[in-house]
Image (cartoon, helix red, strand yellow):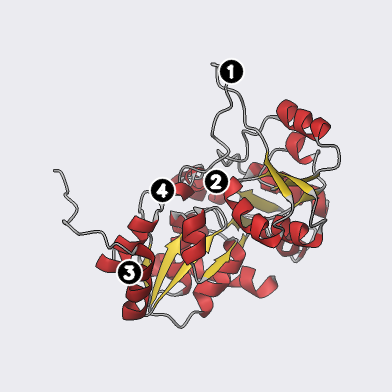
Amino acid sequence: MVLLRPTVSRPTHLAQAIEDLKRQHNAVILAHYYQLPEIQDMADYIGDSLQLARQAAETDADTIVFCGVHFMAETAKILSPHKTVLLPDLEAGCSLATSAPAAEFRAFVEAHPDHTVVTYVNSTAAVKAVSDYCVTSSNAVQVVNSIPPEQPILFAPDQYLGDWVREQTGRENMLLWQGSCEVHEVFSEQRLMDLIAEHRQAQVLVHPECPRHIRQHAHVVGSTKALLDAVRQGDPHGTFIVVTEPGIIHQMRQAAPQATFLEAPGIRSQAGSCTSCNECPHMKRNTLEKLWLCLEHQKPAIHLAPEVVERARLPIERMLSIG
């Protein structure tokens, strides 16, 4: 069966049409730092996963439009189950979330019953539902430090974030699920070193989802918010090498318009050219037109089983209460 999109005339002034629909539906637009610049500019709130989770929990709006990826919209629905939660493109997924299939992860948890399960928010609602705590890259160290040091931890799904948390906390009793992000694991160390050699005064900003051999070159390792804060607090005329999804550079340029921002290079293809794999294809599925259409038609909406919402809410609330 072929599903045809209803014939709709695109408004001449798309941004104004979106604003009108926001008022009509009492909607709020949440956008992640990795979204397209034009979507960030339309958003009521821009942030990393932790900031946006807080906004989803606190908003008075009837409708939440989440310009991000599927697990983020699911998190908003878990925190605001009686609100309408829309995702402009339902196919905006996450390689990290899919690296932990729910059935396999549940079996892994059941095989380690003595472990406290700490799950990165970049995971499906079903995975959160079998977890004890959720974390973001902003507060993972703080949450893990809140757990008694003798208590073994199962950390999932990002092995590299887990490795960084283990470094920061000294927790050797952390068992890591072997998931990863297709964006952050493919930066080229040699090409990064070449860029650093060319720009010796540059500050290197690295997201902790990157492997250790990439993190070792960083001046700052942290969440997207932490990297943005490093720019705000740094030399306003400085040079920054950004080793994360380049969508964050839009906010960095607003924070330091006189600074220079360099995207860290990805791996080379067989043809010898740099791949575009350091740009998240899922985040970039959302567009202004899709944002307008989802507000116009109030779909696609996120739906979760009540029992999943009830069980997944607890680890998220524990995360929010800690940091």
Q: x and y percent of residue 150 in the render?
A: 79, 58
10 Å crowding of disc 1: few (<14), some (14-19), many (20+)? few
The residue labelled by disc 2 is 108
The amino acid sitting under disc 4 is Arg
Q: Is residue 302 visible?
A: no
**Looking at the rendering, which quadrant does residue 234 occupy?**
bottom right
Q: CA distance from mark 2 to mark 4?
A: 32 Å
Viewport quadrant of the N terminus: top left
- Looking at the image, residue 207 sits to the left or right of residue 83; the answer is right
10 Å crowding of disc 4: few (<14), some (14-19), many (20+)? some
Q: Secondary structure at mark 4?
A: helix
The residue labelled by disc 4 is 285
Viewport quadrant of the C terminus: bottom right
The residue labelled by disc 1 is 272
Please give the name of the residue rendered at 36% of the width and 61% of the height, measured from the top-left corner.
291
Nearer the camera: disc 3 or disc 2: 3
Q: CA distance from mark 1 to mark 4?
A: 27 Å
168 or 69, nearer to the observer: 69
Nearer the camera: disc 3 or disc 1: 3
Task: In the rendered view, tell whether residue 208 sits above or below residue 182.
Answer: below
10 Å crowding of disc 2: few (<14), some (14-19), many (20+)? few
